[in-house]
Amino acid sequence: YYNCQNLTGAPACGFNVTNMANAYYDCISLSYSPICGDNVTNMANAYYNCYHLTGKPVCGPNVDSMYATYECCYNITGSPVCGNNVTNMSWTYCGCRNLTGSPACGNNVTDMKGAYANCDRLTGSPVCGNEVTNMYRAYGGCISLTGSPACGDKVTNMGSAYESCTNLKG
C-alpha cells in the first residue's frame, strides 16, 4: 500500500506476514490503530508519515528492525514500545509528538539514532540497553524528559543525544 494516500480505515496485517517494510509508507489518510502480527520481523518504514494514524504503537515479539516505523506519525498516543528482539530503532518514533510515558528499548538494540527525536511529551528517564552503540540525536528535542539518563558502555556516538532536554539531571 506504499503511497496510497487516500487509503482510510485501519491498517491490517495477516497472521503469516513476516515483512512489513514500507507496507503503509506515506498512507497519510489511515486513521486507526496500527496492527502487527506476531510473525513480523521487519517493520522498517511500515507506517512512515501516516500522520493521521491514531492509537497506540505496536511491535510484535519477533520484530528485529523498527527503522523509522512510526516516523512522522504525529497523532499516535500512549507509551512507545519495542520488543526484545529489536536491534535497529533508528528514527522509530521521530516526531511522534503525542507519545507519552517513558521511552525504553529492548536489550538487543544497537542503533538508536534519532529514535525518539522531537517526542516532546515523553516523560521519565531515558534508558537504553547495554548493546547500544549509536545514540546520535536519540532523545533530541524531548523537552519533557526528567530524571537521569542511563546507557551502556558500548556507546560510541552520542552527538546531540540529549539536545534540548533541559529537565534531565545527572
Image (cartoon, rainbow, N blue to C red):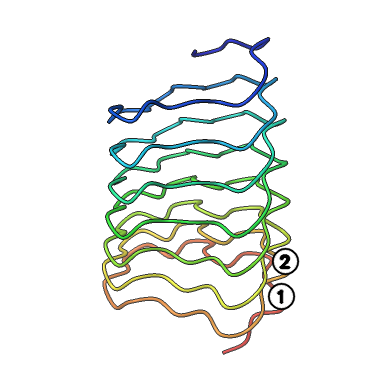
Position in image of residue 86 (x %, y %):
31, 52
Position in image of residue 66 (x %, y %):
40, 43
Left or right of residue 65, residue 101 in this image: right
Q: Secondary structure at mark 1?
A: loop
Tell me if mark 1 has few (under 14), some (14-19) or many (20+) residues whose alpha carbon lies within 10 angstroms of its own: few
Q: Amino acid at mark 1?
A: Thr
Tell me if mark 2 has few (under 14), some (14-19) or many (20+) residues whose alpha carbon lies within 10 angstroms of its own: many
Q: Quadrant of residue 13?
A: top left
Considering depth in this image, is 63 or 45 the residue closer to the camera?
Answer: 63
Q: Amino acid at mark 2?
A: Ile
Q: Residue at x 27, y 55 (%)?
A: 85
- Which residue corresponds to mark 1? 166
Q: Is residue 85 above or below residue 154?
A: above
Position in image of residue 108 (x %, y %):
26, 62
Considering every residue shown, the one lying at the far front of the view is 15
Q: Are marks 2 and 1 in contact (CB under 8 Å)?
A: yes
Count of marks overlaid on the render: 2
- Which residue corresponds to mark 2? 143
Query: Counting residues from the N terminus, which is met first, the one under dot 2 or under dot 1?
Result: 2
Real-space Cα distance between discs 2 and 1? 6 Å
Q: Secondary structure at mark 2?
A: loop
Q: Residue at x 29, y 73 (%)?
A: 130
Q: Nearer the viewer, mark 2 or mark 1?
A: 2
Q: Residue at x 31, y 36 (%)?
A: 40
Q: Quadrant of residue 84?
A: bottom left
Which numbered dot is residue 67?
A: none
Considering depth in this image, is 118 or 55 the residue closer to the camera?
Answer: 55
